Amino acid sequence: MGPLRRFGLCAIVLLAAGSAAAESAQPILPWVRLVPPDHFCVRFGTFGWIGYLRDTDALARRGDSAGAAERERALGEALWYLGRGTGRICSCGSKEAVLADLKRMLPELKRRPGIAYQDTQAAAHVEGVIAGIEADGVAVVPPAHAGCVR
């Protein structure tokens, strides 16, 4: 089982509050959407990534460094799994939406070298994912794709 599938299986199961199959269930990570009956997608094109990063900065400024660090760790882990192992991203949006969001996030990630996972800096990884999508080496697939099953 590849790392992305393992992430999908583990993270999505842990993220669902109450009924995992219900799209209305609120996941702990706001950038993941559960899609009935057993699929998920990352909310590229429909999530305020820059707002999330700025809210994380605001937490740190208010003295909640643990909360800010947890948000950065969760984001770093999620970004690390983008396309890793499977060459596909289960996205709620189109290929264009994924590229636009990743490109918009990249400058913010470069200013935050602490956003990393398993010794991989999020900004460097996202640069590679952008290049992979543009070269058609990383596919953006809808939640109905078989690889997006929880």
Image (cartoon, rainbow, N blue to C red):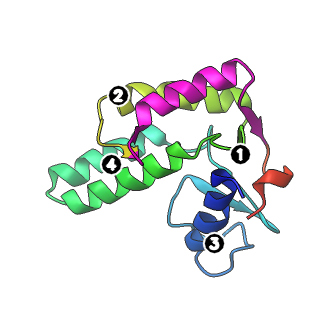
Q: Earlier in the sequence, mark 3 or mark 2?
A: 3
Q: Earlier in the sequence, mark 1 or mark 2?
A: 1
| Residue labelled with disc 3 | 13
Image: magenta residue range: 117-141
Please tell me whether mark 2 sits on a helix, a strand or a loop: helix
Q: Are marks 3 and 2 in contact (CB under 8 Å)?
A: no
Please report the residue visible at 38 percent of the width from the left and 43 percent of the height from the top: 119
Amino acid of disc 3: Val
Q: Are marks 1 and 3 in contact (CB under 8 Å)?
A: no
Q: Position of residue 28 (x, y in %)?
A: 50, 66
**Can residue 13 be seen from the camera position used here?**
yes
| Gap between marks 1 and 3 measured at Cα | 18 Å
User: Which of these two is toward me, 9 or 63?
Assistant: 9
| Residue labelled with disc 2 | 110
Q: Are marks 1 and 4 in contact (CB under 8 Å)?
A: no
Q: Position of residue 75 (x, y in %)?
A: 44, 49
Amino acid of disc 1: Cys
Which label lies toward us, 1 or 2?
A: 2
| Residue labelled with disc 4 | 55
Q: Residues within 10 Å of mark 3 (few under 14, many from 20)?
A: some
Q: Position of residue 123 (x, y in %)?
A: 42, 31
